[in-house]
Amino acid sequence: MWIEAITVRTARPMQCSACLEELAAFGKERGIPAPKWVACYQNLEVENEICIHLAWEEEVRSPGKTACGLLIARRLDPHGLVHHTLWKLSMGSSGEEAWADSQERF
């Protein structure tokens, strides 16, 4: 599994909710594969920053910026500074295992 992370830092915190509302409104685009799951986060230290994570299976798609991720980045671009990166799980864990392990520790 690998993660595509799209972060936007807006000029004002209230713009973050507008970004998320806009993303929720556009829904699925025809012909663009959907990720395994999507998660949205708001930075606890920088209140005008949000990050969208798209989880992809390596068996389905090799790591690289996807049409879905590029579309989201393009939609967020007018709202602020966008940073689009790719991540993979380390130490041979899967997302579900990593999540379960982290819950057991806390």
Image (tube, rainbow, N blue to C red):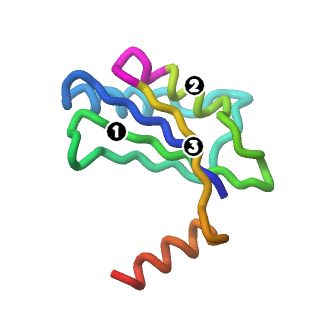
Q: Which residue is mark 3?
A: 4
Q: Nearer the viewer, residue 21 or 57?
A: 57
The residue that appears at 66% across and 70% down in the rendered structure is 92
Q: What whole-number distance in Å separates the C-alpha atoms at marks 3 and 2?
A: 12 Å
Mark earlier in primary sequence (3, 2): 3
Give SS at disc 2: helix
Q: Residue furthest front?
A: 91
Mark earlier in primary sequence (1, 3): 3
Identify the mark at residue 50; answer none if there is no mark. Answer: 1
What is the x, y in percent for residue 52?
45, 41
Q: Quadrant of residue 43?
A: top left
The residue that appears at 58% across and 49% down in the rendered structure is 87
Identify the mark at residue 77; answer none if there is no mark. Answer: none
Mark earlier in primary sequence (1, 2): 1
Q: Amino acid at mark 1?
A: Ile
What is the x, y in percent for residue 48?
24, 33
Residue 80 painted magenta: yes
Q: Amino acid at mark 2?
A: Leu
Magenta region, residue range = 75-81
Q: On the rendered structure, is 21 left or right of 62?
A: left
Pointer 3: residues within 10 angstroms few (<14), some, or many (20+)? many
Q: Which residue is mark 2?
A: 71
Give SS at disc 1: strand
